[in-house]
Image (tube, rainbow, N blue to C red):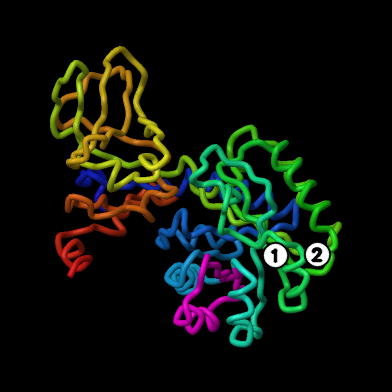
Amino acid sequence: MKMGAKIKTPYYLIDEEKLLKNLKRIEYLRDHSGVKLILALKCFSVWAVSDLVNKYMDGTTSSSLYETKLGYEKFGKETHAFSVAYSDDDVSEIKDICDKIIFNSVSQLKMFYNRVKHIKIGLRVNPGISYSNFDLADPVRRYSRLGVISQKDIMLVLDNISGLMFHYNCENDDFGSFSNMLDKISKKYEKILSKVEWVSLGGGLYFTKDNYPLDEFCEKLKSFGKKYKIQVYLEPGEAVVTESCELVTTVLDIVKNVKTIAIVDASIEAHMLDLLTYRIAAKINAEVGENEYIIAGRSCLAGDIFGECKIRDKLEVGSEIRFADAAGYTMVKKNWFNGLKMPSIVIKRLSGNLEIVREFLYKDFLCSLS
């Protein structure tokens, strides 16, 4: 677009330079650990940046038929398929487009084995340990349906699989925690690990954050892979896109109810739903100061609140508000609640040029219904 031209808010702004910072750390991890890294599309699936992502990653992993197809068609390289439960129709399509298919249960593995035995088959394991600050996202929470618990059950189908998946972390930026849990898994599943070709340790690891001990992480993973002579995979989502995107909004009104409330042209319910689900305040990109505001969305939901802030500049109608870290679990969860216009998707390319890659119009809202 032309320099100086103003983009209509709201929009998600993905900055490729900031994305590249994370990808360079991923490249370092690949080079120094031997691990392969595949993008978790459930977190981030904007395929308009696939050319950049593909230079540093080994493929994609999915949670459904549609994500598997997206990974295969728009990203390429290795395509891993996983689903908590596949339907017959899912398997009919997935079996011809994925490199690896991972089952969540022994029953589904047996059900579909004859139809998928021509590709690499994996089984998700519930190791009984995890790292998560939220019960809602804890993969091994009480009564969890995610993964096989019984080692005896795994041993009975070991000849039918080539790999395992342990997905047991959520927002884990503590290397010590990761290291200790991997040691426990290594000890607990030693006999099984020695008989497979590959193991995925899932996602939820914030190894691209500043000050994370990346060299120790590399050595730990390298040692684990070497011990069992296996190819290790990681499935990062947030670690790939952290701090690379903003949700850019405009103040539409300012009202007062004891506190001053600025209402913007977006909605946390519709456009940053993950924050509302986990009751986390949005990060507001603004200099700290003495002006206090509640920043609210414009849906009819009473709790449509991005958060409270103290900022330097006084807000008025037309002021711009930017919410940081708006890549992971945002665009994949956006919805048409209240019929609010979805934010456009804009990319700031490495060249510095801004490119509007997607705008959402009334016809998109119309066609999402019946």
Q: Is residue 340 left or right of residue 78?
A: left
Residue 297's spot in the image, x, y percent?
A: 23, 37
Amino acid on which disc 2 is placed: Ile
Q: Secondary structure at mark 2?
A: helix
- The structure residue drawn at horizontal position 73% and vertical position 44%, both measured from the top left corner, is 181
Front in this rendered view, residue 62 or 190: 190
Where residue 230 sits, quadrant-wise, is: bottom right
Residue 352's spot in the image, x, y percent?
A: 38, 47
Front in this rendered view, residue 336 or 14: 336
Mark 2 Cα shell of 10 Å, populated few (<14), some (14-19), many (≥20): some
Q: Quadrant of the C terminus?
A: bottom left
Vertical position of residue 200 compared to residue 117: above or below: above
Q: Is residue 309 magenta?
A: no
* Mark closest to the chain's N terminus, 2 or 1: 1
Q: Is residue 141 left or right of residue 301?
A: right
Mark 2 vs 1: CB contact within 8 A: yes
- Residue 164 is labelled as 1
As drawn, the residue found furthest toward the front would be: 143
Residue 90's spot in the image, x, y percent?
A: 47, 78
Mark 1 Cα shell of 10 Å, populated few (<14), some (14-19), many (≥20): many
Where residue 31 sits, quadrant-wise, is: bottom right
Which contiguous range is marked in magenta?
77-103
- Residue 192 is labelled as 2
Q: Secondary structure at mark 1?
A: strand
As drawn, the residue found furthest toward the top would be: 290
- The structure residue drawn at horizontal position 68% and vertical position 59%, both measured from the top left corner, is 149
- The structure residue drawn at horizontal position 38% and vertical position 42%, both measured from the top left corner, is 277
- Residue 283 is labelled as none
Mark count: 2
Vertical position of residue 117 compared to residue 29: above or below: below
Amino acid on which disc 1 is placed: Leu
Q: Is residue 40 left or right of residue 294?
A: right
